[in-house]
């Protein structure tokens, strides 16, 4: 990454961590994905049951590969063979020791925005797993909450929708049309503004571009 961009990310990352901590999240800034992987593994106890949803950034830093190869009980929907198994894995993740996810948008004052189609991801962020770890690249960070919501709706969701094969306006045009299509993936929009119990949600903010 160009040095200027890294410096920009490093400076804003420090602000982000401070503001997340002021909201009682646990928060860390890691300059690159290798450091982020080390930090994530430090936060996950050996033997823990670990589930995930909407966690492309965690996948990109190599976390799922490390967990699947290590001494952890992973709930991996990609290994499920039938829709019924996938559904059960999503339900089991609600009771995991650790839930991994990402952010669709973040505001520099320390709030997170997530959009969900089926709801399992936002449900697990809100309640259930004792520990939630969010891996998010600095490309997700906007100056304001309004801008973070706009990013989630007009950038993250249309990009994410390219993966799913039922027609919505954004799948065809790449642009959100605020649709009411049957296949709409924007069914819940969650703002996580504060953490209780203290430290239940842990952020690993990475000084790289990750995910959607
Ligand atoms: S067009 Fe529909 S599915 Fe696509 S981003 Fe907008 S609301 Fe979501």
Image (cartoon, rainbow, N blue to C red):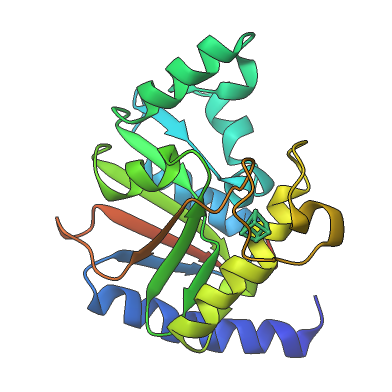
Quadrant (top left, top right, bottom left, bottom right) of the N terminus: bottom right
Give x and y (percent) for residue 210: 68, 60
- Which residue is outermost to the left? 197
Give x and y (percent) for residue 116: 50, 49
Compare residues 175 and 162 and report the one nearer the observer.
175
Q: Is residue 138 left or right of residue 167?
A: left
Q: Is residue 35 visible?
A: yes
Give x and y (percent) for residue 23: 24, 74
Which picture quadrant has residue 174?
A: bottom right
Which residue is located at x 21 percent, y 69 percent? 24
206 in relation to 90, above or below: below
Compare residues 2 and 137 and report the one nearer the observer.
137
Which picture quadrant has residue 22?
A: bottom left
Q: Is residue 212 visible?
A: no
- Which residue is outermost to the right? 173
Which residue is located at x 42 percent, y 68 percent? 112
Which residue is located at x 54 percent, y 23 percent? 76
Quadrant (top left, top right, bottom left, bottom right) of the C terminus: bottom right
86 in relation to 43, above or below: above
37 in relation to 212, above or below: above
Give x and y (percent) for residue 131: 29, 44
Q: Is residue 12 left or right of residue 42?
A: right
Which residue is located at x 77 percent, y 43 percent? 167
132 in relation to 137, above or below: above
């Amino acid at each position: 990454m160009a040095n200027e961009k890294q410096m920009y990310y490093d400076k804003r990352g420090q602000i982000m961590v401070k503001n997340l901590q002021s909201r009682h999240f646990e928060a860390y800034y890691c300059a690159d994905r290798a450091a982020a992987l080390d930090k994530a593994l430090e936060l996950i106890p050996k033997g823990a049951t670990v589930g995930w949803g909407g966690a492309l950034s965690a996948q990109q830093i190599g976390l799922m590969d490390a967990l699947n190869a290590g001494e952890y009980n992973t709930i991996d929907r990609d290994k499920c063979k039938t829709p019924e198994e996938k559904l059960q894995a999503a339900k089991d993740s609600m009771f995991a020791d650790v839930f991994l996810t990402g952010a669709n948008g973040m505001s520099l004052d320390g709030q997170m925005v997530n959009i969900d189609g089926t709801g399992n991801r936002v449900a697990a962020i809100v309640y259930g797993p004792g520990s939630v770890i969010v891996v998010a690249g600095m490309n997700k960070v906007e100056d304001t909450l309004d801008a973070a919501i706009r990013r989630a709706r007009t950038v993250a969701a249309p990009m994410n929708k390219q993966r799913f094969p039922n027609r919505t306006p954004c799948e065809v045009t790449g642009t959100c049309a605020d649709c009411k299509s049957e296949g709409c993936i924007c069914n819940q929009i969650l703002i996580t503004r504060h953490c209780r119990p203290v430290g239940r949600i842990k952020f690993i903010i990475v000084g790289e571009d990750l995910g959607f």
